[in-house]
Each structure stands twice: as structure tokens, then as C-alpha cells.
Amino acid sequence: MMLSWIFEAAARIRSLFSKSALDRKLQEELDAHIEFATEENIRRGMPPDAARREAMLQLGSRDAALELHRDTRGLPSFETFVQDLVYGSRQLRRNPAVTLTAILTLAIAIGANTTIFTVANALLFRDPTGVTDPTRLVDIGVSYKGIGFGSNSYPNYIDIARNTTTLDGIYAHGRFPNGTKVAAGGRVERAFVMITSTNYFEVLGAKPVVGRAFAADETSTAVLSYRYWTRRFNRDPAIVGQTLRLDEKPFTVIGVASDGFQGTGVRAADIWIPLIANDRRNAAWLLLGGRLKPSSTQAQAAAELRSIGNALAEEYPADNKDKGLEVAALSPLPGETRPVGGFLGLLMGIVTIVLAIACANISGVLLARAAARRQEIAVRLAIGAGRFRIFRQLLTETVLLFAISGIAGVALARVMTSVLISQFPKLPFPINLALSLDTRIVAFAMALSFVAALFSGLTPALQASKGEVVSALKSDVTRSFGRLRFRNAFVVAQVALSVLLVVLAGLFVRALLNASIIDPGFDLRGVELATLDFKTAGYNEATGAAYARELVERIRRIPVVEAATIATVIPGGFEGIGLGGLSVPGVIPADGKPLFSATWNVIEPGYFATLHMPLVEGRDFTDDDQAASPAVVILGEGAARRFWPGESAAGKSIEMRTGTQPGQGPPPAKRLLVVGVARDPKFGSLVDGSSGIYAYLPLQQAQLQVWTMIAARSTDGRRLTEEIRAAVGSANPNLTIESSQTGDEYASLGLAPWRIAASVSGSLGIVGLLLAGIGVYGMTAYLVTRRTREIGVRVALGASRSSVVTLMVKQGMRLVAIGGFIGMAFAAGAAQLLASLLFGVPPLDPLIFSATAALFLVIGFLACYIPALRATRINAIEALRHD
Amino acid sequence: MDDKLDLLQGTLDLMVLQTLATMGPQHGYGVARRIEQVSGDKVIINQGTIYAALVRLQHRRLIKAEWGISGNNRRACFYSLTARGRKQLEERAANWQRISNVMDRIFDQAAEEPE
């Protein structure tokens, strides 16, 4: 039985290609049929004419037979679909101006959505090139008390690799590629070197295109990236076997990675070198990842690693206490997926609003078109077309329109993506973002177009196919006002969404302006920043402090350096570190918690001078504040004002409590003497709403953090990269500089999300505004046309032209006002939600809301007035004859 | 018109197969006429629908078509059963018979019931 279906299906498809031949065959058979029937009838005694007539009656309608034959032998659904497409494209061509405007509008909206999706795809979803079966790979991160996804140490890595049964291989690599001095063939330059375990290429399934990857236990070998090999060595295969000097150490090139392979992360590497074993279990600088065994699931691996993590915490409490292991699917930004995802989600929300506006716009246009065609539709319904058939045909037209727009949108997205990327700040290292079109992106665009088409076209198609036949055929105007209600709703929706968009854009732009203009309380211009990793070089609390002091003094001695310092956190980029809470004798926190939470920083003397942060009271740390001296602290002025309003803070004491242990009573308090008060950095953290309590500890008295930054200001504003590098290198060749950038670059990095959000919402806000204007314009023009006869009557009865215009404008403005109010309400709500991101701009900023209201009033009025003017040119006599 | 039976396309197909089995190769008119006669003119409302059934059976490879010359030297397209068609006919006819027997018994029961 099954086979019959297959034969039939194949035969049906085949029959599509020989329609005329099959039709002809049927006609021949029907002719023969009539002849046979006629002959039999004659034989039975009928006269020839009657015989033939009877034969034809018996056969029935030839057209019906033909139709039935066609339906049975072909694919009727598919054929009607093709028919609809052809008819639809003809309709679209009939009104090229409207069609092109619609396509352009939609292409912009779909293009914007596709662009954001492209970036999201590259940052969150895309499979890394050159890696085999990336869906079976996972990232392994370290959590502290259940939070976070950070790096691990080498001895831990070895233990994990040894004990796992769910993972087929675990690799480790440095957090990101380091800028390194590379000497090869007489030339010296800077390249980015990534340290990985020797099984890295093997576990990832990345085969080198030349030479080989690392063998186990190798140390001084290097694999080049394809891009670097091309750029630097002109794809010369003889490079294999040559020696490079990386920071003066020799490495033998053993292979070149495949084209496009860049590891699993976003930051690009030029050279990979193998990891060297060490036994420092507390030096957490490696990111781990692994490949699931064919029989394991990610959940199983997560469970196993959790227990391995617990075992490690028990066995080595000094280094691993409270640390757990988390497993996540492979991602270009391990552990950072949520904040990046959140930001991209915001952008996605903005572009979706634009798409909604465009859809509402198109719906209005479709409704108008359907109204114009109601006679044609009524006729078709009257002669027997099913309502569903008409509905389907109108919907197919809409889908065709959106499909064309979708394709145009994808093309536009390529341009938009380049523009968006140019908004990103210059980074001190190269990144690898795969932004080219792939199937996922195209599929997204087409799916979005289809959904938008349904969204946009459903209501107009439903309305149109209802077609009150009698009234339409009689050209009765009054009945079609039901559709007006829908069109009104679409215009209101457009205006509301545009208002929302414009308000958001205004808020973001203002926030960005705030962030750049307002005196931040510090000055990073002319400052060189370099990040160092102390723990990898082998320093601990004791030796690190001494080395840091020696290093900063060495840098200060450089003639061209005006001031220098070392600190854990530099304002303008990222938040302070968490060293616990503090309590103040005699002062109780307002929110009832036992401790104040503070934003800590660990600094060397000279911090405030280097960053031009004034000290409003007391003194900076000095060389006398050593580990053995009394413990001191400098507070921010906000904190000082809060704890001791109206009094001098210098000389007072606070208590610092680190590490709350559940169920073990209050933690030990360290008493700190306040020796100075500094101006607060205004936008010291990426997200406003930081604690407001800034506290600084001298590096000599506090724990050395893994990452610290050198900040050095030069006397003449020049860059100090080489000088710092020399100073660091001469003091300790093992200490690597992670990254080196100017203060401006550092600060702009922090503001990048705002800059992007402002430009995206700003440009799209303009688009949205235009669309809304067009929507209102179209609406009023439609109104004027629909009410032509009524206007003629009014004028004939003595109404002045201007009163007619006023009537039209009032109706249009009513819609604008309603839409405006709704939009403002939504905008107020959205602004409240985003308040913390706005750098102090009040969410209900009167300036922005009133400016938006004024803008929409003006644009709305113009959009109503201009088409309403047409009403004045209506000839009353002709109008009365108009339908 | 009212006493003509409403036919499912599957049933019409079966009638066509049986007709071809009994009569041998036939053209469309012949099949239609035969079905009308045997059913006492109770079946086909308009004969044109036979051609849809014929093309369907052709698609399923249960019958095949060949142009030929009829009794009165007229060119017509003759349909005949294929081997598959013959087998299908046997199976479906047997099935039909089984159903028919069961239905008979059920209706007899119903007739006897009210006592």
C-alpha cells in the first residue's frame, strides 16, 4: 500500500511538467467519449442530434471533468501557491512606488535585526572554525562560593584531567594571548602568543595544515596561526624547523594551524606555545576545556566535575577552599555570556521595536490596498471562490513582499554590520569575530521575514476576505468603515512604538554625553596603563609587595615619567574588588545590614597624584606605611561624609571585616586608621549604582592581588610602553605584561556599550520617527480619499475649506495624541527599568520627554496637514459623484 | 438524482478495477457505461469523473494505458490491469467481502433484537 503512495506522489510531481500534454490527452479522450456515447444513443434509436445532446449531458461539464482531472493528477496546493505568487507579483508591480517604499522600510528593519543577530551569533553561538565537532566541547570554570566562572591553576588542572571519566581529554590555555616580542629572520615585532597544553590541538580536533601540532611534554616549540604565517612569512612552508625568539627565548616552529582556526575564544592568537608545568596550586591563570566522551552528556560531566571540585577543595583547603568547578557549553566568551547576552538582548529589543513599527506600517498599507480592491474581491467571492482561497492569496502576496524584503535586508545587514563594527573602540589586541554570512544568519532573516509577514498580513487578509459582497458591488461607502478601526489601531501602534524608541534613544545619547562631559573626578589622559600578572611570575604576598615597590620606584626614576603608581583597579573601567565589608564604630548602616559594603582598591603611594584625583583631607600613603606599621586606610569623600557628617575624618577609625564564615560568629576585624580622604570617581564603574563607599588600602599592608596595573603619566604626553616594558623586564624577566594601553583607550572601552547603544537607538529612532510620520501621512491621505463625497456635501452646504481641513487634521492628530500617550507610558516604564544604566540621567528626564512630545506634535501635525490640504482642492460637484 | 449513491473515491476505484478485470482492456466510456449498467444506473452522476479515477489508478501503477483502435475504427485510449492491480483487486475485494459479511450479521442481529 505504501508503495502506491510513493508512485502516486512521484507521478503527481512529474505531471506538473507536462500540463498541456496531459490536458490535450484528456480532451482527446473526452471527444472520443462523446463519439462513443453518441453512437450508442443512435443505436438505441435516438435521432443524431438528440443522441449527441444526450451524450454531452451524460458526460457532464467538460470543464468540471478537466478541473477534477487536474486536481487528481497534480499538486493542487502547490499549483495554487505558484498561481498566487505570480498574481501577487503582478499586484506588487502595479504600484511600484508603494511597493518599493514598503520593501525599503522592511529591508532596513529586517537588516537591523539581522545585524544584531550576526554580532550575537559571532559572540555567543557560532562554532569556532577548524574545530572538529564543537558541540561536544565544554568549558570548565572555577566558581567561588558558587558564583563566577574563572581560571584555574596548573596542579588542579592535572588532577582534574587525571580523575575525569566523562571527558575524553581536557586542555588548558592562558586567559588570552599575550603581546610578546618576536624575533625571526632578523626582524623584531610584537605578536600575540597563547600558551596552551600540549593536547590542545588534539582535543579540539584541529589539524595543522603544515607540519604537526604539539607532542606530549614538548616545551620549546611553536605553532603559528595561518593568518600570521601568511602575513609574516608569506606562507613559506620552510618556516617549519626554523627558530623564533619569543622574549629572547628560542622556540622551534613545528607547524601551522588551518586557515581560520583561532582556538575557541574571541581574542586572536598569532602563535601557540606549550604550557610548562609548575606546582603553584594557587596561581589561577588557566582556562580549561574538554571534550565529552561519546557516551557522556554535559549534565553527567557537570556532576562529575562538581564532585572532583569538592574533592580538590577538601584535599587542598589552602588553595581551593570554597572553589567549585562548573561546566558550560563551549562559548567564545566563557563565563561572560550573561552580561554580553544582556547587552545584546537590549539591542535586539530596540531593533525589534523598529520591526514592529515597520510591520504596523505595512499592515496599514495592506488594509488600504485591500479596501481599494474590494470590488475585485467581491466579484471573486460572488462567482464562487472560497473565502479561504482569497485569504490565502492575499497572505501569499504579503509573504512574497516580505521575502523580497528579507533578501534585501540580508544584503543591507552586511553594510550595517561594518558600520556597527566601526563603532567598537580600538582594542589593544586583535580579536577574531566571525561576522560573515552563514546559514544560521540567513535562516534567521528568512524566518523573521516570514513571522513578520504573518504578523503584518493576517489582519488585512482576514478583513479583506470577509468582503461584504453586496455592498461592495454596489460601491457603498459606509460599510467599509469597520476596517478603519484597524487602520487607526495600526497608526496608533506605530506612533506609540516610535515614541518609545525616540525616548530611549534620547536617554542613551544623554547618558553618553553625561559620561563624557561631566568631570569624572580623575584624569586618564596622558596616562599609560599596563596590566601585570604577579602570581604567574611566582610572587606571593610577601615577595610581591617588595617587588611592586621596587618596580614603581624604578619606573619613577625614568626621566620622562612624571608620576607613577601601581594599583589593583583604575577608575573608568571596571569595578573595585571585593575585600569584604566594613563597620564604623557608632555608625549603623541605613539598610539594617550589619556591615557597609565597600568598593576597595589596593594602591601604592602616588595613585591620586598620577590620576589627578585630589585629596580633600589628610595625606596619601607614604613609604612609612609598611606591613609592620599601623594599618591605615584612605576613604572616599562620599564615605567620609556619610560616616562622620560635618566632621573631619582624618584620625577616625573603621574596622574591616573579611571573609564571613556562615555559622562561625563574626569574622575577625582589622582596625584601620583613616589618614586621608580623596575625591570620589564619579563613574568609577561600568554600571552606575556602585556602593558609593570607596576605600583604599596600601599595597604594602594588603593582600597582593593577581592582576595589578601600572599607571604612569609622562611629562610630555607620549606613550611609555617601551619604558615600562624595559623596567619590568629588567627587574624580573618572568613577569609578563598582559596588555598595554593608554588611559583614553581604557576609558573608552568602558563606555563602548553606551556608545553602541546610543548610536544604534539614535539612528533607528530617526528611522522609527520617519516611519511613524509616513504612517500618519498615509492614514490622513486615505481618510481624505474615503470621505471625498462627504467633503463634497459639506462644501456644497456651505462649509469653508479651512474647516474641512481642520476636521481632517483633528482626526489625524487625535491618533497621534493617543499613540503619543501610550508611547510615553511605555517609555517611562522602560526607562525605569534601565535607570541604573543611565549614568545619572533621571529616567523621567523632563527635557527628553518634552522634547520628544514636541517633536512628535510637529511631525504629526505636518503629516496630517499636508494630505489634508488635498481636501481643499476637491471639486464639490465631482466629489458628490465620487464613490 | 437523490437515489444515486454517494461514492468514496476508493470505492469507485475498486469498481473500475473490477470492471477492467471482467471486461478486459477498455476505454473510459466503456468503463463508465459498464459501471452504470451493472449498478442499475445508480452510480455515476456525470461520467466525466471517471477520467480522474483512471488517472489516479494509473499514477498508482494499478492500471496502464495504451492507445488503440476501437470496434468502430475509432482511436481511443484503452486501460488494462497491471499485475499489481490484479493483486490489489483480489486483496481489496476479499476485504470488502469480509466487511460486508460482518455488517450483514450485525444488521441481522439488530433486526432480531427488539423482543
Image: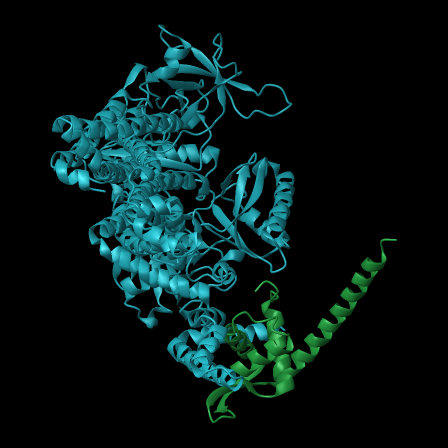
The mark tally for this picture is: 0
Q: Position of residue A244 (x, y in %)?
A: 34, 61
Q: Residue at x 24, y 33 (%)?
A: A713
Quadrant position of residue A795: top left
| Observer-nearest of A141 and A103 | A103
Q: Position of residue A474 (x, y in %)?
A: 30, 45
The quadrant of the picture occupied by the C terminus of chain A is: top left
Q: Which chain is green?
A: B
The answer to which image quadrant residue A426 occupies is top left
Residue at left 51%, top 56%? Answer: A135
Look at the image and name its color scheme. by chain
Q: Above or below — where is A29 with respect to A661?
A: below
Q: Residue at x 18, y 26 (%)?
A: A806
- Asked whether, in this view, residue A366 is left or right of residue A865, the answer is right
Picture quarter with the N terminus of chain A = bottom right
Q: Which chain is cyan?
A: A
Instruction: Residue B72 in the image: state x and y as whole percent.
Output: 49, 93
Up the image or down, A87 lies above or below A488; here it is below
